[in-house]
Image: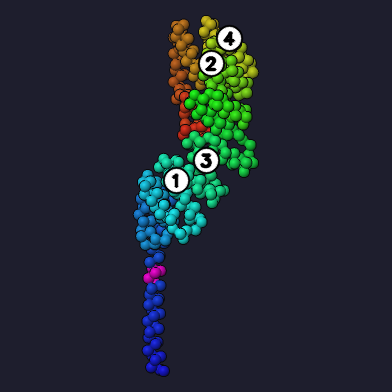
Amino acid sequence: MEKIYWWILPAIVLILAAAFFVIKMRREKVKPTQTLYVDGLKALLAGDINLAFHKLRQVVTQETKNVDAYLKLGDIFRAKKRFDKALRIHKELSLRRSLSPEERLEINKALALDYIESGDHSQGISALTEILKTNDRDAWTLQALLSEFEKTSRWDEAFQLRSRFLKQKKEKDNSILALYKVFKGEDLASRGDYHKARLAYKEALNYDERCVPAYILLGDAYYSEQRLDEAVTYWKKLLEIVPKAGYLVFNKLEKTLFELGSFGEISEIYEQIYRENPKDSHALFALASLDEKKGRTEEAELKYGQILEIDPSFLPARLSLIRMYQESNQIDKAKEMVETLFEILPAKVEDFVCEKCGYKSPEPLWRCPGCEEWNSFNI
């Protein structure tokens, strides 16, 4: 018995030593992998994607089960616009059976971003819609889907989704919903379907009575079919509901009333606006321009001066005065105006500026092309 014991004891010692050695080796192997992974994350946070890529690639070489490292490698490929490689990594990850629900969600979001940023919006929308089948309240996915609907002019779907947001938040601001109807109407009008376009614009006004482009475009749609009286009706309605935006249809009204043989009405319209708001520079400028056309130069000059007292940066009035001074040979006055013009010109080159990102446009816009903010031009 003692002989057997002395044979077994060394064997047990050898087995324990081997087990200890294996465990130690495994721990030593895992430790550098974890360090590489953390280094990779730190590099990502620091914006050094090349270093992050190098570290994370080492991680997945040593530890193929590190889903997050693979996921971030794919994200780096996307950032480098290597969309084919990003898609391949994320698709291969999505086929793994051992994924947790959280990991699967993140992988599916990454796939959606791969499609969207590569310009494949149709596949991006499909991927986002697929996520919502199992995560129908995921805020990021819902917002990304809304953005895709807007980018691809799918206004009906954008309308439904934003309506859902407003209902969930118990908000009543329908101004963007109204603009969706406006943009849908513009699409219809571009195809010559002015009847359906007008219906869309009128729907917009049901959601937001102060929707400026709906009034403008309703008038345009009627004008396109030579229904001039109805065009004038909606442009006048804009003057009544949103008088500060009325100047956007002044030229349209003048032209159409002239065609109707009712041009005399226009001065009454401008005078009424000015009476109700004596600081409305646009209405006063329109009246001054009419005075000029009628040869009443002194009255026109006086009104242009009044405008510059209200708003010294109102460029059309300043330019009109310079021209009038030159025509009447008042060179000193013209020179003084020009010198002042150079002082204000850098800040007044564009008429419309996005309040959020500073994007400049010579035309009124209802959504900023720069930051995609709605109603940010203070029109």
Hey, what amino acid is under mark 4? Ser
Hey, what amino acid is under mark 3? Leu
Question: Would you say the magenta stretch is mainly helix, strand or loop?
Answer: helix
Hey, what amino acid is under mark 1? Leu
Q: How many marks?
A: 4
Work out how far the residue at label 3 is from the one at label 2, CA to CA, in angstroms: 37 Å
Residue 183 image point, x, y percent:
52, 30
Pointer 3 residue: 146
- State the quadrant of the C terminus: top right
Residue 302 image point, x, y percent:
55, 11
Viewer-closest of 73 and 190: 190
193 above or below 5?
above
Is residue 270 part of the magenta span, yes or no? no
Badge 1 density bin: few <14, some 14–19, many ≥20, Cα 10 Å:
many
Q: Secondary structure at mark 3?
A: helix
> Which label's residue is closer to the chain start, 1 or 2?
1
Q: Are marks 3 and 4 in contact (CB under 8 Å)?
A: no
Viewer-closest of 128 and 7: 128
Instruction: Give the mark toward the camera: 1 or 2.
Output: 2
Q: Residue at x 44, y 16 (%)?
A: 338
Q: Secondary structure at mark 2?
A: loop
Q: Are marks 1 and 4 in contact (CB under 8 Å)?
A: no
User: Which mark identifies residue 262?
Assistant: 4
Work out how far the residue at label 1 is from the one at label 2, CA to CA, in angstroms: 47 Å
User: Which mark identifies residue 325?
Assistant: none
